[in-house]
Image (cartoon, grey):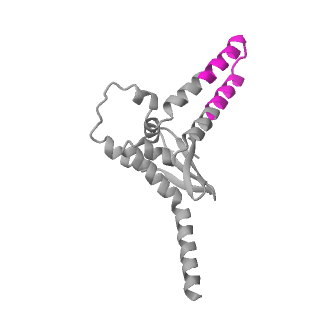
Amino acid sequence: MKKLFILVVVLLLSLGGYIVAGPYITVSAIQSGIAENNPEKLERYIDFIELRKNIKAQLIAKMEESDRESEKNIFSSLMSGIKAKLVESMVESLITPKGLANLVEGRNAVKSLTADDPTPKQNEAEEKENIFKDARFTYDSVDSFSIRVPTEGNEEIRFVLQRQGISWKLVNLILNQNVN
């Protein structure tokens, strides 16, 4: 009976340790997936459908906010529909394993996708291995974990992981937050 009790305690502690370490394991897997340029690995740890949906919602909300602040006329109403379609196609093409790698590294994803030099740089592999080098890691709740990566200026990108069962997945990016 005593051995069974010890076994149960050890199993519960192991499970608890895995759950607590889960976000860090996921971050490490995302980092190595980006470094290895392995889209299959990234898809195991990133919910691209949810991520695209959340980013589209953010960008459309920002556009609507700027439209409310600007002068309303017939052209702005017409353009808001076009802008929404543009945002949708932009997010679909940029929120990919390569686009995320560029975003995490603090690079402009559009510029890097259209760069003329297709050959990788010597230090690019080192950069990809240190993606979250300056990041801050925090638990937001029992089911939510954030990685805050500083960008140029006084801003940061917040990567949000959510627990799904006992594993964690990247589900949201909160772009260009001002750092307090």
Q: Quadrant of residue 174?
A: top right
Given residues 131 and 47, the one toward you in this image is: 47
Q: Position of residue 48 (x, y in %)?
A: 54, 40
Position of residue 144 relative to residue 3, above or below, is above
Whether residue 127 appears in magenta in the rendering, the answer is no
> Magenta part of the protein: which range?
58-85
- The x, y position of residue 85, in whole percent, is 61, 22
Horizontal side of residue 117 vs 91, given as left or right: left
Residue at the (49%, 38%) spot, across then down: 153
Please tell me which residue is depicted at 62% across the width and 21% down the height of the picture.
83
* Residue furthest top as drawn: 74
Q: Quadrant of the N terminus?
A: bottom right
How many marks overall? 0
Q: Is 66 within the magenta?
A: yes
The image position of residue 180, as x and y in percent, is 59, 47
The residue closer to the viewer here, 96 or 60, is: 96
Q: Position of residue 74 (x, y in %)?
A: 72, 11
